[in-house]
């Protein structure tokens, strides 16, 4: 009876002001938008990001989840993909590939094999802490997103591959999945739509490499988490040899809101090719570290001042920022002044949005030691399958820790940069690139600091002798 009432409520939840949004003044005037940021509360998709409200099904229904989900599913895969393409949504896991296009790869003539959606909840990128907030405080967003995304590609089931360390997140997700089954929202005849769709959760064992889609699929199949060559791509031969799409938690979780409010609504945020809202993780030397949903293309300085409480000791105390998680090159204060937080703007300054994990370093930070520690992380997490990554990360770690002391020659700066270029683009997966880019960013912006440190070390050694 309780399940029936919950199901009835999910299909008849009154449309509230959460779903109503007037056009922005800029759009009304017909001009092009030139300022970004300051997202209004009524435009936020993740309304329980901080766990202030109940995370179970009753709380989710009050926040508007599962509203008109049956209608969305019944409109069919072509309509869902059209709305996602209209929205301009790009993958939120780091690569930024157009989501609607990626999902459309699955809509090929049936060949007898089942299709699967795999959700990458292995969030292991240093500094990134967004997906865990969704799974812990708003798990029904992801469950509903799995159903909508699965319907867009004709998948029969979704596998949520969750990082092993996420105990509370896995527990809440399992409860949410069970609640959805009991309410008739997923499983046979999901939401009364006639579409059968199951969701399974698989817990990993904490390997960073399993965040790479092919390594994740290998692990899901019970093998070692090592990336495999592409092609064939997952859309052709994925998990269990069947067509598969691997998508990030945030990417999947926003799909129902896009379908309810319309792709044009989502596309009204951010610059062209960088549309939508985004979860930003702000950590490091700021006064109030947090995860916050904001408009894409918000200026980096405004993001930190408005939501991070500003840099510790004031903006003038800033040294550098890693804008998109540990794997993207850092940028110095001079660039941070006016750069926008989106894919294209950060590529222009030779960095990247990545997972939008903003790591702030003030002048008290030893930037060389910080990068050395990151390279040590990538050395530890390399699966060892590709020689450039297996050997190169070890070499870079040794050199970087000598740079920390200054125990090196200036010519070695060019040597380690060349080494990073030999790793970048020469491995099966992107872990080699992730290890190379922090070093390249350090040399690009802080070469004088490296040279000064070497000179000081040489002088100290000379004084000792």
Image: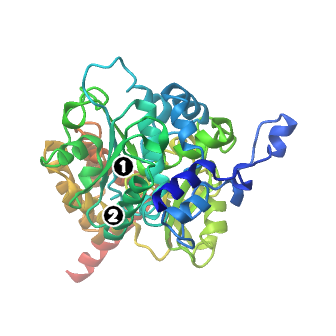
**Front-lying residue, 384 or 162:** 162
Residue at (61, 60) in percent of width and height: 63
Front position among marks 1 and 2: 2
Q: CA distance from mark 1 to mark 2?
A: 32 Å
**Front-lying residue, 415 or 315:** 315
In x, y percent, where is residue 176? 41, 60
Residue at (41, 67) in percent of width and height: 367
Q: Which mark is residue 170?
A: 2
Residue at (23, 37) in percent of width and height: 239
Residue identified by numbered label 1: 437
Among numbered discs 1 and 2, the one appearing first in the sequence: 2
In x, y percent, where is residue 295? 64, 51
| Residue count near mark 1 (Cα–Cα under 10 Å), binned few <14, some 14–19, many ≥20 | many
- Please tell me in which quadrant of the rendered image residue 182 appears: bottom left
* Tags 1 and 2 touching, CB below 8 Å: no
Q: Which mark is residue 263?
A: none
């Amino acid at each position: 009876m309780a399940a029936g009432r919950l199901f009835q409520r999910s299909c008849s939840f009154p449309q509230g002001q959460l779903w109503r949004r007037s056009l922005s003044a800029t759009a009304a005037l017909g001009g092009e938008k030139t300022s970004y940021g300051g997202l209004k509360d009524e435009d936020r998709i993740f309304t329980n990001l901080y766990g202030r409200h109940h995370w179970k099904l009753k709380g989710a229904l009050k926040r508007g989840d599962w509203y008109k989900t049956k209608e969305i599913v019944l409109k069919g895969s072509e309509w869902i993909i059209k709305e996602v393409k209209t929205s301009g949504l790009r993958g939120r896991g780091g690569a930024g590939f157009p989501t609607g296009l990626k999902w459309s790869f699955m809509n090929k003539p049936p060949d007898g094999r089942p299709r699967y959606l795999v959700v990458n909840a292995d969030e292991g990128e240093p500094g990134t802490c967004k997906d865990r907030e969704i799974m812990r405080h708003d798990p029904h967003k992801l469950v509903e997103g799995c159903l909508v995304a699965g319907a867009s590609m004709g998948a029969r089931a979704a596998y949520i591959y969750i990082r092993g360390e996420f105990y509370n997140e896995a527990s809440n997700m399992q409860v949410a999945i069970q609640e959805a089954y009991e309410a008739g929202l997923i499983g046979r005849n999901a939401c009364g739509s006639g579409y059968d769709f199951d969701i399974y959760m698989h817990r990993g064992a904490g390997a960073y490499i399993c965040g790479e889609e092919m390594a994740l699929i290998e692990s899901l199949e019970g093998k070692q988490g090592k990336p495999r060559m592409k092609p064939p791509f997952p859309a052709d031969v994925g998990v269990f040899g069947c067509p598969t799409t691997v998508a990030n938690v945030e990417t999947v979780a926003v799909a129902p809101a896009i379908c309810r409010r319309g792709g044009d609504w989502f596309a009204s945020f951010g610059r062209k090719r960088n549309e939508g809202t985004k979860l930003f993780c702000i950590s490091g030397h700021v006064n109030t570290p947090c995860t916050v949903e904001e408009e894409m293309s918000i200026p980096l300085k405004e993001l930190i001042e408005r939501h991070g409480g500003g840099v510790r000791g004031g903006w003038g105390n800033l040294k550098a920022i890693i804008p998109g998680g540990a794997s993207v090159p850092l940028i110095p204060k001079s660039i941070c002044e006016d750069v926008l937080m989106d894919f294209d703007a950060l590529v222009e300054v030779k960095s990247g949005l990545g997972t939008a994990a903003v790591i702030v370093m003030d002048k008290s930070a030893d930037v060389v030691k910080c990068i050395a520690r990151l390279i040590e992380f990538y050395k530890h997490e390399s699966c060892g399958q590709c020689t450039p990554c297996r050997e190169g990360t070890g070499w870079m770690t040794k050199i970087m820790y000598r740079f920390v002391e200054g125990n090196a020659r200036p010519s070695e700066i060019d040597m380690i940069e060349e080494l990073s270029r030999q790793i970048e683009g020469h491995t099966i997966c992107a872990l080699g690139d992730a290890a190379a880019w922090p070093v390249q960013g350090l040399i690009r912006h802080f070469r004088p600091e490296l040279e000064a440190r070497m000179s000081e070390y040489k002088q100290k050694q000379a004084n000792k002798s």
